[in-house]
Image (cartoon, rainbow, N blue to C red):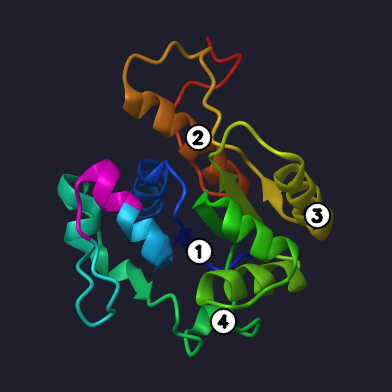
């Protein structure tokens, strides 16, 4: 049976709302979430969501990240790790997890994963999931895509990662931005084996 623990990394691509919503949904599903936020990711969260995330693990406040969505959540299941903390369990293959999502995934992080870099905890955890043959979901949010980015996507896919671009579908007739966010988050949950009913599935009508 897969481990209950999941890893979520938020990096410096636009689309911070995807990552924050994913953390919320996983916690509501009863999963333990190991969260890593890059400095650029924290800047995007501040810019797009107006929330100040403290990178220092001793000062990190889950309420500051999740906002009103934190109500009713078991916040003890959220384990935050500093992006430079290689002592964290998720830096080792001996620490069992059910998968990892980098959501959103910057092109810099994608490049690092493609070349097997382990310069910070996000990159190391991603590398661990690949070498241990565990599910790694990368959620890039960039357009247009150049040849370098496309080749990096091919490289990580060949290594075993799932490339899941933040491309919401419209067949469920979304009415709010939140509906578009939930479409992508729902697809990430599907890949991680987490039951979700965030959006109507094709063929359900």
Location of mark 2 (residue): 184
What's the mark number on residue 155? 3
Q: Main secondary structure of the magenta part?
A: helix
Q: Residue at x 54, y 51 (%)?
A: 105
Q: Which of the pair 78/117 is nearer the observer?
A: 117
Circle 3: is it few (<14), some (14-19), or many (20+) Cα within 10 Å?
Answer: some
Q: Secondary structure at mark 2?
A: helix
Marks counted in the figure total 4
In the rendered image, the residue lying farthest to the right is 158
Position of the N terminus by quadrant: bottom right
Q: CA–CA distance between discs 1 and 3?
A: 23 Å
Rendering coords of residue 29 (x, y %):
40, 51
Q: Are marks 4 and 2 in contact (CB under 8 Å)?
A: no
Residue 75 placed where, x, y %?
A: 25, 64
Q: Is residue 84 visible?
A: yes
Name which of mark 4 and mark 3 comes first in the sequence: 4
Q: Nearer the viewer, mark 4 or mark 3?
A: 3
Q: Earlier in the sequence, mark 1 or mark 3?
A: 1
Q: Residue at x 33, y 68 (%)?
A: 77
Q: Residue at x 59, y 64 (%)?
A: 98
The earlier-in-sequence mark between 4 and 2 is: 4
Residue name at image x 25 percent, y 44 percent: 49
Alpha carbon separation for disc pair 2 and 3: 22 Å
User: Which residue bears the numbered disc 1?
Assistant: 6
- Kindly identify which numbered label has been placed on residue 202: none
């Amino acid at each position: 049976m897969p481990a209950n623990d999941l890893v979520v990394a938020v990096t410096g691509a636009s689309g911070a709302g995807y990552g924050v919503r994913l953390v919320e949904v996983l916690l509501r599903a009863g999963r333990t979430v190991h969260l890593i936020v890059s400095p650029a990711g924290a800047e995007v969260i501040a810019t797009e969501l107006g929330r100040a995330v403290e990178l220092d693990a001793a000062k990190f406040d889950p309420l500051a990240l999740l906002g009103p969505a934190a109500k009713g959540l078991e916040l003890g299941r959220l384990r935050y790790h500093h992006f430079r903390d290689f002592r964290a369990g998720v830096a080792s293959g001996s620490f069992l997890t059910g998968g990892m999502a980098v959501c959103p995934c910057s092109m810099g992080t994608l490049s690092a994963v493609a070349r097997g870099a382990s310069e910070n905890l996000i990159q190391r955890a991603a590398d661990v999931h690949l070498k241990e043959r565990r599910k790694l979901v990368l959620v890039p949010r960039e357009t247009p895509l150049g040849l370098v980015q496309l080749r990096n996507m091919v490289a990580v896919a060949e290594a075993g990662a799932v490339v899941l671009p933040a491309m919401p579908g419209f067949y469920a007739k979304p009415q709010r931005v939140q509906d578009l966010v939930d479409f992508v988050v729902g697809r990430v949950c599907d890949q991680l084996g987490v039951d979700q009913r965030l959006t109507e599935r094709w063929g359900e009508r």
